[in-house]
DNA sequence: AACCTCAACGTACCACCGGTATGTGGTCGC
DNA sequence: GCGACCACATACCGGTGGTACGTTGAGGTT
């Protein structure tokens, strides 16, 4: 119904999002001009402002795309079969993997909170990666695998810990070794929380 | 030796840093214009560019000031007497308190990694808050209070967990309750790490 | 005392960037 | 075939970071 011969509109929109994604990842939000984006997408600023209300809206579109790709990878792992504990550990490993992608790291972790504002970033994250982490923590608690802790705060802290771990890996001189250290440390922390609940 | 009648130079420099600190905290880096800063400091852009190489250098001066004030508060706690464990827990509580200050939250946690670049931020943090966290982790390990884990990675992850906890507190509808939850959760995690080492 | 020097600014100006207002070509319904 | 409208392109504006240059006045030198 809503199509001419081909949907050129959607393709230019996608081209803009793709170009923005690349440039934001490489140079950051502030250092990327709209001229550079439209040049890369082979269109003009008229097209950009036809599809988006401004630079920030374009950023959020790129943000959505990165997040959507991320949860697509994570959902398979977390919704698989096995115990709540095993699925949680698999999810943690998978999320660290996601955090290693430059686009996710720069756009979602670093720039989104300042570009979108922390409150809005927090709200958006409810439906994306953080939502999965939170659900995982809830299932761990309800399954009695870890202590009964405040879900919201525990999820936030785990979320921050995982991001920091991923950043450490990405910035380390020897990423392979760093990845092993992160996995070891996170595993130890989670194991500690698990063991802590056993004597009760 | 290097002074005229009074050191007017240093006072204008300090006025610029103070004004920048206030405005960056309130409106953020990007939304704060140099005109607004020099107007608030009662000087002109000529003075600003005489003392600083640009907007980013001015930000870093503000960053330094906030961080210096922060470690001044933390050093007392961490260097106090008592067991390594007690000092570590006191330090964690103190750091959460520091993270509640708007200036620290906005400038150090949120904007600095973006404005200065993550690599440079990481390097600077070595001499500030992260340096203390790292030292604390080292003392805990060498005192045999927690498992023998990779220091660098463990400190990074703890640092990220604390930052995330502090952000959660600041953004929560009931900060008092959130602060209690964060302390409880972090304590539980640390206790798990401690207990995990006992049977060995 | 006349002169020079240099720090410590102030003033004027430029290039660039985000955003807006307006123009234009192709296409679909009628 | 003609108005209407979508999907852009073009031209332009205000603000901002940064720069070039001018000015002032307190030491030092002779």
Image: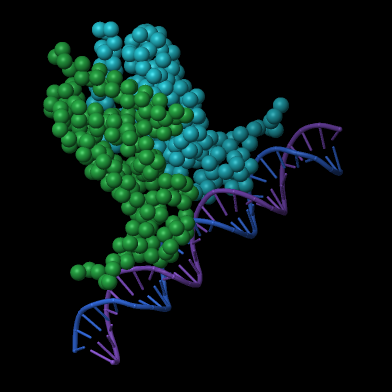
Chain colours: A cyan, B green, C purple, D blue
Q: Quadrant of the C terminus of chain B?
A: top left
Residue B181 place in picture, x, y as percent: 37, 23
Q: Quadrant of the N terminus of chain B?
A: bottom left
Q: As rendered, which of A68 and B88 lies closer to the eye? A: B88
Q: As rendered, which of B146 and A36 lies closer to the eye? A: B146
Residue B104 place in picture, x, y as percent: 36, 42
The residue located at (55%, 39%) in the rendering is A57
The residue located at (38%, 12%) in the rendering is A141
- Which quadrant holds residue B148? top left
Q: As rendered, which of A110 and B187 lies closer to the eye? A: B187
Image check: B104 left or right of C15?
left
- Which quadrant holds residue A179? top left
The residue located at (16%, 23%) in the rendering is B145
Residue B164 place in picture, x, y as percent: 36, 31
The residue located at (43%, 62%) in the rendering is B42
Number of numbered discs overlaid on the protein picture? 0
Above or below: residue C19 compared with residue A158: below
Please say whether residue B49 is visible from this viewpoint: no
Residue B165 place in picture, x, y as percent: 36, 29
Q: As rendered, which of A3 and C8 lies closer to the eye? A: C8
Please say whether residue A46 is visible from this viewpoint: yes
- Which quadrant holds residue B189? top left
């Amino acid at each position: 119904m809503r199509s001419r011969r081909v949907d050129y509109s959607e393709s230019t929109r996608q081209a803009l999002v793709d170009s923005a994604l690349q440039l934001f990842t490489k140079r950051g939000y502030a250092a990327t001009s709209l001229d550079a984006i439209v040049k890369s997408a082979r269109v003009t600023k008229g097209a950009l402002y036809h599809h988006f209300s401004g630079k920030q809206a374009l950023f959020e579109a790129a943000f959505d795309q990165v997040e959507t790709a991320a949860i697509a990878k994570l959902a398979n792992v977390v919704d698989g079969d096995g115990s709540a504990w095993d699925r949680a550990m698999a999810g943690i490993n998978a999320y660290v993997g996601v955090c290693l992608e430059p686009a996710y790291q720069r756009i979602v972790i670093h720039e989104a909170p300042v570009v979108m504002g922390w409150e809005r970033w927090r709200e958006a994250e409810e439906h994306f990666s953080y939502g999965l982490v939170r659900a995982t923590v809830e299932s761990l608690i309800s399954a009695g695998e870890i202590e009964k802790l405040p879900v919201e705060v525990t999820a936030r802290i785990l979320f921050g810990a995982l991001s920091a771990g991923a950043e450490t890996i990405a910035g380390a001189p020897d990423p392979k070794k760093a990845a092993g250290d992160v996995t070891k440390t996170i595993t130890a922390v989670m194991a500690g929380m698990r063991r802590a609940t056993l004597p009760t």
